[in-house]
Image (spheres, rainbow, N blue to C red):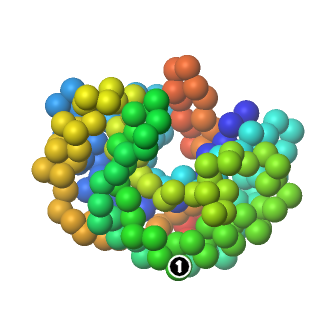
């Protein structure tokens, strides 16, 4: 099974991002919460693991890590896209030493799972982002970006409030929150 480790935001920042998702949906773009079933919330994904037998241990270790974390500040200051076939439009946070250190500490803490980690999310490969829309055709990216910019007030600031483990299935995309832990 595929498990995503997510950093969730404080409620004020989450509501700002949900407003952008809603505006994208109204404009006819595939905002993240409209293409996935389940409990999709605005987030930063810090890891994705493919595990079968150790999922309980993955959840336990992730929650334990969350108990030891502090609330990292986060500031979204730009909009970006990945040049891939997935057509992903995202908000990009300012990459701070604090955010990179949290990410690196997570991988140190779960080092025994590293062989199961998706390469995009590993240390020195991770591009922190909060997905706004997916499956955008190349010609739709600029129009969707305009919607994001029209419905944003930069910088969008807040903090990391929770860490969570989500089970992710593809075709069709489905996300289920397994467990979460508030960070202090």
- Residue 86 at x, y = what percent? 46, 32
- Residue 96 at x, y = what percent? 47, 76
Residue 120 in the figure: left or right of residue 54: left
Q: Is residue 158 depicted above or below 89 in this figure?
A: below
Frontmost residue, 145 versus 29: 145
Quarter occupied by residue 26: top left
Frontmost residue, 54 versus 31: 31
Give the farthest residue toward the top: 171
- Image point 58% across, 26% down: which residue? 170
- Residue 142 at x, y = what percent? 22, 39
Q: Is residue 171 depicted above or below 71 in this figure?
A: above
Quarter occupied by residue 105: bottom right
Q: What residue did someone put label 1 on?
A: 98
The C terminus lies in quadrant:
bottom right
Residue 113 in the figure: left or right of residue 137: right
Q: How many labels sit on residues?
A: 1
Q: Is residue 135 visible?
A: yes
- Image point 79% across, 40% down: which residue? 51
Quarter occupied by residue 32: top left
Give the farthest residue toward the left: 150
Residue 140 in the figure: left or right of residue 131: left
- Residue 158 at x, y = what percent? 35, 70
Frontmost residue, 7 versus 86: 86
The N terminus lies in quadrant:
top right
- Image point 37% across, 46% down: which residue? 81
Q: Is residue 61 depicted above or below 146 in this figure?
A: below
- Image point 29% across, 48% down: which residue? 18
Crowdedness of circle 1 by 10 Å Cα count: few (<14), some, many (20+)?
few
- Considering the numbered disc 1 on the image, is that residue within a helix, a strand or a loop? helix
Q: Is residue 11 visible?
A: no
């Amino acid at each position: 099974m595929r498990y995503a480790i997510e950093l969730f935001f404080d409620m004020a920042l989450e509501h700002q991002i949900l407003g952008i998702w809603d505006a994208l949906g109204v404009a006819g773009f595939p905002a993240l919460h409209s293409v996935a079933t389940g409990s999709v919330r605005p987030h930063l994904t810090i890891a994705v693991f493919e595990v079968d037998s150790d999922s309980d241990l993955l959840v336990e270790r992730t929650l334990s890590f969350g108990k030891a974390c502090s609330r990292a500040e986060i500031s979204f200051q730009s909009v970006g896209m990945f040049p891939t076939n997935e057509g992903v439009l995202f908000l990009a946070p300012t990459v701070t030493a604090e955010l990179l250190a949290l990410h690196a500490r997570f991988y140190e803490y779960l080092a025994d799972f590293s062989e199961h980690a998706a390469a995009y999310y590993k240390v020195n490969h991770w591009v922190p982002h909060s997905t706004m829309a997916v499956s955008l055709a190349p010609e739709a990216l600029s129009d969707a970006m305009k919607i994001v910019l029209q419905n944003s007030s930069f910088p969008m600031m807040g903090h990391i409030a929770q860490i969570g483990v989500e089970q992710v299935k593809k075709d069709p995309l489905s996300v289920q929150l397994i467990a979460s832990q508030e960070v202090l």
